[in-house]
Amino acid sequence: MKLHRRFSLLLFPTLFTEKLMLRIAIDRRDILRQAADKMEMRRYVENKVGKRYLPRLYCVTNDPQSIPFDTLPSKFVVKANHGSAFVRVVTDKKTIDLQSLVSECQGWLNIDYGQCYSEWGYLGLKRCVMVEEFVESSYKDKQGIPADFRFLVFDGQCALIFVDIGRPPSVRRNLYYPSWEPMPLTLGLFPWTEGPLEPPADLRAMIALAEDVARGIDFVRVDLYSTPCGPLVGELTMTPGAGMRRFPDKKFDRLLGKKWKLPKEF
């Protein structure tokens, strides 16, 4: 809360960032934990829109040593279910140190991510490692890793789209309105791409999917991939950036804050 220098935010939140911090401080609805746990998130999405909108799941285990690398395809994605940035994208398994990857996975499992930034949704989650398909996309970086399309959705209406190209620490991020009009600012530590981006061919389908998944939730960020077979859901995020990202221009913070109608439980 001190980060945003508005000590009245718990009583009179108006900005998007204030309402996000309020959620972190007092919101204890089940949906926060469903979205935080990537396995539960998959079940939520499957129940809401169907399994075909999820990447294929190859393996789930709480013992990284048991990951069946021999039977996995050349490309895959390894992630932990219980936190953010616990992910390793493998584009050619012949070129990686599998034991090092196993050790990295074990390191993820040793962390209670909820304690890192005091996010209740992540606290004490049952931890596991997931192996999913590598999503092929024409919208990708130079290494072939698909772009992340992050849709900010309020009460089933998309308000803003982040397009992240590349993986940390080399991410570039562009911001767009649903009409694909650029939003003229940056957010977080990520610079813009070197030139404007063309909208994905399935943009309308992506927006529709994000809104369908988010319907009934006051605010959620829905992350999607653009694929030749249609959009896929990557994850849902209820507390983006753990509430620590600030808009450099308060008018956009205020604009998104107006779109967020807090639930009566607050």
Image: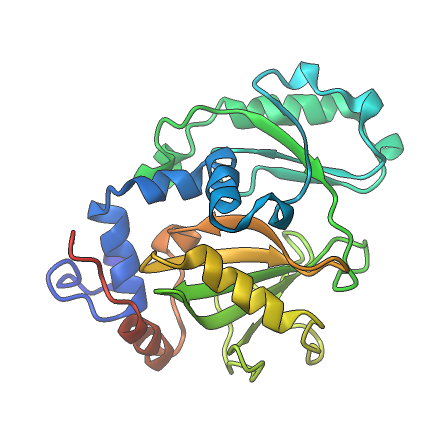
* Rendering quarter of residue 181: bottom right
Position of 183 relative to 35 (above/below): below
Quadrant where the N terminus sits is bottom left
In the picture as drawn, the residue positioned furthest to the right comes out as 94
Residue at 74% across / 57% down in the picture? 229
**Spot occupied by residue 44 in the image (x, y as percentages of width and height):** 46, 42
Q: Quick one: 248 or 136, which is closer to the camera?
A: 136
139 on left or right of 103: right
Position of 13 relative to 44 (above/below): below
How many numbered circles does the render carry? 0
Q: Quick one: 50 or 233, which is closer to the camera?
A: 50
* Rendering quarter of residue 107: top right
212 on left or right of 78: left
Residue at 65% across / 21% down in the picture? 103
**Spot occupied by residue 216 in the image (x, y as percentages of width and height):** 34, 57
**Spot occupied by residue 146 in the image (x, y as percentages of width and height):** 72, 56
Quadrant where the C terminus sits is bottom left
**Spot occupied by residue 194 in the image (x, y as percentages of width and height):** 71, 76
Question: Can residue 78 be spotted in the picture?
Answer: yes
Residue at 67% across / 72% down in the picture? 193
Question: Can residue 188 be spotted in the picture?
Answer: no
Residue at 44% across / 51% down in the picture? 237
Q: Quick one: 194 or 175, which is closer to the camera?
A: 175
